[in-house]
Amino acid sequence: MGKDDNNKLGPLAGPTPPAAPQTLGTALAHEAVSQATAMVVQDGATYLRQVAAVTAAGIAVATAKMIATQQPEPWTTIITKLNASLTAAGETFKALGGDAAAVLGQFPSGS
């Protein structure tokens, strides 16, 4: 092989390796982190939906008991606590989403 044959190999012929593997690795890392944070948000949404379902069922039972007994207590207290639980679940979901975004923001997109 002569000196001119080496030039035909293009950018791979030089002593410096191409940047593609590093870019590809960064993109794959970003994709993995993106998928992991998306799963965290999905799990948080599932948790919120489940708490909302339990809250709705609990409020329905407490309302029925309040009507049947013609007594507001302890049913109004129970309804208030159920609503507080749903509010706390919403705050948890909000925190999960913010934390997931913060983690994702620590990884460059590679583009």
Image: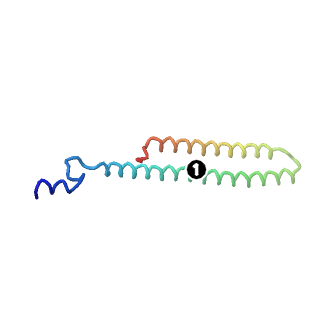
Residue drawn at x 79%, y 51% is: 62
- In the picture provided, is 72 more to the left or to the right than 105? right
The x and y percentages for residue 87 are 68, 43
Q: Residue furthest left?
A: 2
Quadrant where the N terminus lies?
bottom left
From the viewer's side, name the closer residue of 16 and 71: 16
- Mark 1 falls on what kind of element? helix
Q: Is residue 26 above or below residue 2?
A: above
Answer few, some or many: residues within 10 Å of disc 1's Cα (few below 14, many 20 plus, some between 14 and 19).
Answer: many
Q: Amino acid at mark 1?
A: Gly
- In the picture provided, is 61 more to the left or to the right than 32? right
Residue drawn at x 80%, y 44% is: 76
Q: Residue furthest bottom?
A: 1
- Find residue 98 and report its image quarter: top right
Q: Which residue is mark 1?
A: 44
The x and y percentages for residue 54 are 69, 53
- In the picture provided, is 46 more to the left or to the right than 111? right
